[in-house]
Image (spheres, coloured by chain):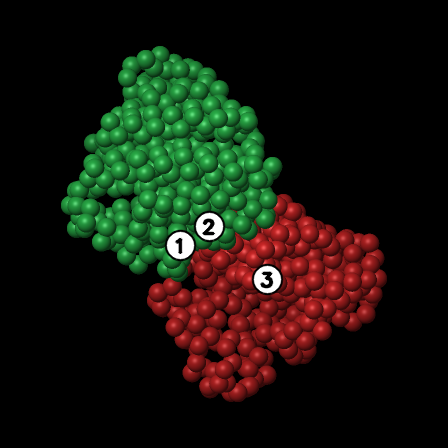
Chain colours: A red, B green
Amino acid sequence: MTEDLKFEVGTRLADVDKPGVNARTGVIRTPHGDIATPAFIPVGTKATVKTLTPEQIRQTGAQAILANAYHLYLQPGHDLVDEAGGLSRFTNWRGPTFTDSGGFQVMSLGAGFKKTLAMDTKGLERGDIKAEKKERLAQVDEDGVDFKSFIDGSRHRFTPEVSMQIQHGLGADILFAFDELTTLVDSKRYQGEAVERTRRWAQRCLDEHHRLTELRSDKKKQSLWGVVQGAQYEDLRRDATRGLIELDRRAREDGRRGFGGFGIGGAIEKENLGQIVGWVCDELPEDKPRHLLGISEPDDLFAAVEAGADTFDCVAPTRLARRGGVYTLDGRMTLTNARFKRDFSGIDEEFGGYVSQNYSRAYIHHLLKAKEYLAGTLCTMHNVEFTVRLVDNIRTSIDEGRFYEYREEFLGRYYASLK
Amino acid sequence: MTEDLKFEVGTRLADVDKPGVNARTGVIRTPHGDIATPAFIPVGTKATVKTLTPEQIRQTGAQAILANAYHLYLQPGHDLVDEAGGLSRFTNWRGPTFTDSGGFQVMSLGAGFKKTLAMDTKGLERGDIKAEKKERLAQVDEDGVDFKSFIDGSRHRFTPEVSMQIQHGLGADILFAFDELTTLVDSKRYQGEAVERTRRWAQRCLDEHHRLTELRSDKKKQSLWGVVQGAQYEDLRRDATRGLIELDRRAREDGRRGFGGFGIGGAIEKENLGQIVGWVCDELPEDKPRHLLGISEPDDLFAAVEAGADTFDCVAPTRLARRGGVYTLDGRMTLTNARFKRDFSGIDEEFGGYVSQNYSRAYIHHLLKAKEYLAGTLCTMHNVEFTVRLVDNIRTSIDEGRFYEYREEFLGRYYASLK
């Protein structure tokens, strides 16, 4: 059995032999088109990048979108999306698609139904597993996770097999193995257990992915990516990575499908993000793409690309936009602020793009104040275009051998207002 | 002084010599482009056709948009829109624009702030002026109207002069004279007084329009249209129309600007809509365009076109859309209905259009249930395209001499589900 997803490495950063430095450009070839990497992938949680039509998503320069297994399982149901012909036909986004496993959401949103988020560390001591368990409504056991729906509080259970069945139903080009989300307050012992459990789950994902692939000829092209956990611990991250590589190797030896790529997930503090991605990418094979889950801040993107991540997704650009928060080359601004009432310049005329070229800050300020839908659409288009183009520019800077110069130039200016 | 707006009549309906039959095709030439008539003009109340970008409005086939003096006076202020370079620059809609006078809104929304709407006839007797006055928060006097803001309840006053100043600030191609909105429960005596007052206000609008046009060379191309009131009474409607024609004649004799066209407003019951428009258009000169305010139901559009109306606006297609109500050739449907959950056909595949060709009822049902912004966008695009194209088809049917055949075919099918 062949792996349909191909990844071709382009330019490698000159410093690429240093530990923790693994930056490269590349192309992921999916059944729905190519993704030039590094690339930012906007999130369409409920099978829609909120406020945008597929044409508008395309206009931002986005090459692919990422939807959410957890949300689509609850509403409208993965079986319905399957019946519709999969995510691409259902949404009319005809480019490449990703789905995440739902692991993050069942353990954060699932626990959050009218209760404290599992990710919320308030009142918890680092390593105090007991206190943490008490707060959680999502309960992890060896087999899977029980959780409550964020919509109506109804009880559900996800296992690696359920996640694969959902993601096969959704039919994205790239899907992720079901992993356990831990938090920064979990003890190292618990993190170690979670890494082991995530590895066992990854094997079950491979098995179920194989079984489902054999069942349905129309699902043969989906590519499963393993997800590396291990929090902030170098030994756990390296162990987790090697474990997944070993699972992949054995699967291939048995003539079965392995992992088409790898995801890097879990609890990561901003300060050591680059380091953690570096440990993982030092271990990972050069010829497979690597997706860093849930990242979009400019400094994080530069750090993660340097360390070897190829693709990124995050809800921040779209979520922030709906409240009027927009990115500029000189940092973030909030267009609800009264100082924009009579500001007839574009959001960022130097950056340019569809929104800055066609609408004034004053117009968007008015739309936000009047609670008009179009405010969300315009701010979303701007932020997605900004983030997509930033990563596109990072890609070009690697190809042109000026990654570090570009990083210094961009970040120096972007964060200047914070100094 | 010349009138910059030109109107050219194309085909006249064969029956056009019968009383009350005045249908014709034509072209209104505005500074921002031509409008082939009959035409439906979508409403962009607060300087946005809710949920749509200008490109999406254009994609529906709409030739012009109509914004609201009352709403834009309150938020963000007409002075700000003026500073931005007018409605067209502010919104980035570069086609023709209309503004209505605010007369309707100050007397309906203005009265509605935390109170009974003036248009709400509950508890009122027909002709019981006293009871009605008690309910109203908008108070009409000879000079103008006092009303409360729908946003914060603050007190404001509109006069014909204020309406002209606001509409000059907004800078649309076509603006309307400030008129008094009456209701169906007003006595005939009161309606007669209102017609007289509206005529005096129309003269003040002409005067203020002239004064403002002389002040600002960049406003020379705005075209003021008089508004005919008179409710359901033939004598009042004909008097009102003749009165405005007389004002126009005198203005031109004095070498001043007259009316570039006419609006037909006020309290109209569905049953006699065609008749009322017919009385007015029998009186109106052939060489001026006629706009019927606030109409979009298919049977009303056919009746009004037959009677001689050229352009139409209405919030119904866009308002209905945001709740999931959509038009089809077989009548209206509401996509929130559970029967659409697994309906993978387009809204109306025979009608076609962008939305029906690209999205399923099931997808839009999902978006509505998930309260996703895109639901409103897609339903709005569909309804605007549907209404615009219906009126476009009526235009073609007149040009091709098969207006009555098309009417019978369309309405027979559209309303069949109601029989």
Decide if residue B288 is on the left or right side of residue A29. Answer: left
Q: In the picture, which quadrant includes the N terminus of chain B? A: top right
Q: Which mark is residue B156?
A: 1
- Looking at the rendered structure, the secondary structure element under dot 1 is strand
- Looking at the rendered structure, the secondary structure element under dot 2 is helix
Return the residue at label 3: A339
Disc 2 to disc 3, C-alpha distance: 20 Å
Return the residue at label 2: B73
Looking at the picture, tell me which residue is in the foreground, B355 or B73.
B73
Decide if residue A231 is on the left or right side of residue B307. Answer: right
Tags 2 and 1 in contact by the CB under 8 Å rule? Answer: yes
What chain letter is assigned to the residue under label 2?
Answer: B
Residue visible at 59% across and 74% down in the picture = A267
Residue A173: image location, x then y, percent: 57, 51
Q: Amino acid at mark 1?
A: His
Query: Neighbour class for label 2 at 10 Å: few (<14), some, many (≥20)?
Result: many
